[in-house]
């Protein structure tokens, strides 16, 4: 279970953050992205807990590379759902501020991995045809005059 922080402790940690993380933490766009991710993955009931976890990542309390595992353990999400949510949050929320997060944690933040999309039917390579030779003059026909 993650440790809960008092408002005083929260604000003390917040004051030490780079400006980019401060701005992103309370940005309306960040909140909208989190809501859309939760809605898309049908986990709106966990919205508040996910916001709290993202806040802990921004404050330097939860490393981004442990985010998916924390979603599974703390929120009891299935592995696949936690993976999808984690990938989307990494892509839309953590990745734009990765340089600030890297400075905060002193470890590189991995770029978001794109989910692999498998085609419904196999892709067959196109076989190129040889160009046809130009027609030759037919010597068995007599010219018409």
Image: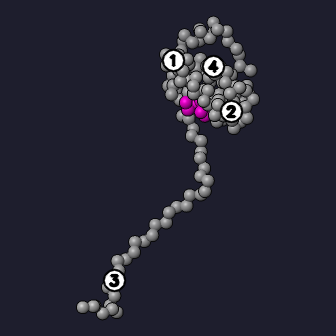
Q: Nearer the viewer, residue 46 or 1?
A: 46
Q: Which residue is mark 4?
A: 56
Q: Earlier in the sequence, mark 1 or mark 3?
A: 1
Tag 3: Cα neighbours inside 10 Å, few (<14), some, or many (≥20)?
Answer: few
Q: Earlier in the sequence, mark 4 or mark 1?
A: 1
Q: Earlier in the sequence, mark 1 or mark 2?
A: 1
Q: CA distance from mark 2 to mark 3?
A: 69 Å
Q: Which residue is mark 3?
A: 136
- Quarter of the image holding residue 91? top right
Whole-percent x, y for residue 55 in the image: 61, 19
Q: Which residues are magenta?
A: 85-92
Whole-percent x, y for residue 32 in the image: 57, 25
Q: Residue at x 51, y 22 (%)?
A: 100
Q: Earlier in the sequence, mark 2 or mark 3?
A: 2
Judge depth for marks 4 and 2 and give the one in front: 2
Q: Which residue is mark 2?
A: 42
Q: CA distance from mark 3 to mark 4?
A: 79 Å
Q: Are marks 1 and 3 in contact (CB under 8 Å)?
A: no
Is 102 displayed left or right of 132 in the figure?
Answer: right
Q: Main SS of the magenta segment? A: helix
């Amino acid at each position: 279970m993650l440790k809960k922080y008092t408002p005083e402790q929260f604000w003390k940690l917040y004051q030490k953050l780079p400006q980019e993380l401060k701005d992103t933490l309370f940005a309306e766009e960040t909140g909208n992205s989190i809501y859309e991710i939760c809605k898309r993955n049908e986990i709106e009931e966990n919205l508040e807990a996910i916001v709290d976890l993202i806040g802990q990542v921004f404050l330097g309390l939860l490393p981004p590379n442990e985010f998916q595992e924390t979603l599974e353990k703390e929120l009891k999400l299935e592995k696949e759902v936690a993976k999808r949510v984690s990938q989307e949050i990494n892509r839309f929320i953590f990745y734009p501020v990765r340089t600030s997060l890297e400075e905060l944690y002193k470890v590189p933040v991995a770029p978001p991995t794109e989910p692999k999309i498998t085609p419904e039917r196999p892709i067959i390579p196109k076989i190129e045809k040889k160009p046809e030779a130009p027609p030759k003059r037919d010597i068995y026909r007599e010219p018409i005059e």
